[in-house]
Image: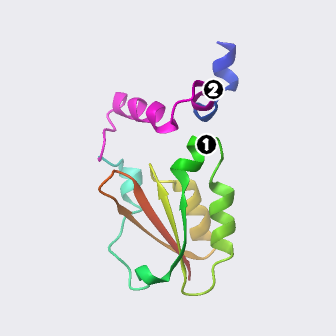
Amino acid sequence: KTVAKVTSLQQAAIVGKVPLEKIIMPLREAVGQTGDILTEEEKKYFHKKPEWFKNELIVETINAGKLLDSGDNPMGNIIDAANSLENRYILKVVHTFVPAPIIDMLDKKGFNYWLEKNRDETISIYFSKK
């Protein structure tokens, strides 16, 4: 009981040497959020491909899932990379789920975003300055 009060899923994954998504996905399935089904909350972040998006303008890619698996919190990396973007250029973030808090924060700070679901069930999130 005591360990559960102070341990995050991320910390448990590190201690157990298990990828974080191996812990999260069964929990999502247990509450009915299986595989490629997005929650209503997650669906609101998906829009049609915007005019500002051009693949050749991607200047950096961050694999947030790999950072989480290694015990790092990718939020700081993503925010720093976004803040250093020059106009028109795009940051690509690959994640295993919709990182709503990061998207909301950068949206409020004046960034465009666009999400697309990949064949491998990851999600690519693209950010550029408005």
Label 2 is placed on what type of residue? Val
Kindly identify which residue carries mark 1: 70
Compare residues 9 and 41 and report the one nearer the observer. Answer: 9
- The answer to whether residue 31 is above or below residue 130 is above
| Relative to 104, 7 lies left or right | right
- Whether residue 2 sits left or right of residue 127 in the image: it is right
Estimate the x, y position of residue 41 in percent, counting from the top left. Answer: 41, 52
| Badge 2: residue crowd in 10 Å (few <14, some 14–19, many ≥20) | few
Where residue 62 sits, quadrant-wise, is: bottom right
What is the three-letter code of the residue carrying label 1? Ser
Identify which residue, 52 or 20, lies in the foreground. Answer: 20
Task: Answer whether residue 53 is visible to the viewer in this image.
Answer: no
The tag earlier along the polypeptide, 2 or 1, is 2
Q: Main secondary structure of the magenta part?
A: helix
- Which residue bears the numbered disc 2? 15
Q: How many marks?
A: 2
Is 11 above or below relative to 110?
A: above
Instruction: Identify the residue at horizontal 52%, vertical 36% (top origin).
Output: 20
Residue 24 position (above or below residue 88): above
Name the residue rendered at 64%, 31% in the picture: 11
- Taking depth in this image into account, of 18 and 86 the one nearest to the observer is 18
- Under tag 2, what secondary structure? helix
Q: Say which mark, if any, is on residue 108.
A: none
For the magenta stretch, what is the residue range?
12-36
**Residue 56 image offset from top left, x and y in percent:** 44, 83
Identify the residue at horizontal 60%, vertical 27% (top origin). Answer: 12
Quarter of the image with the C terminus is bottom right
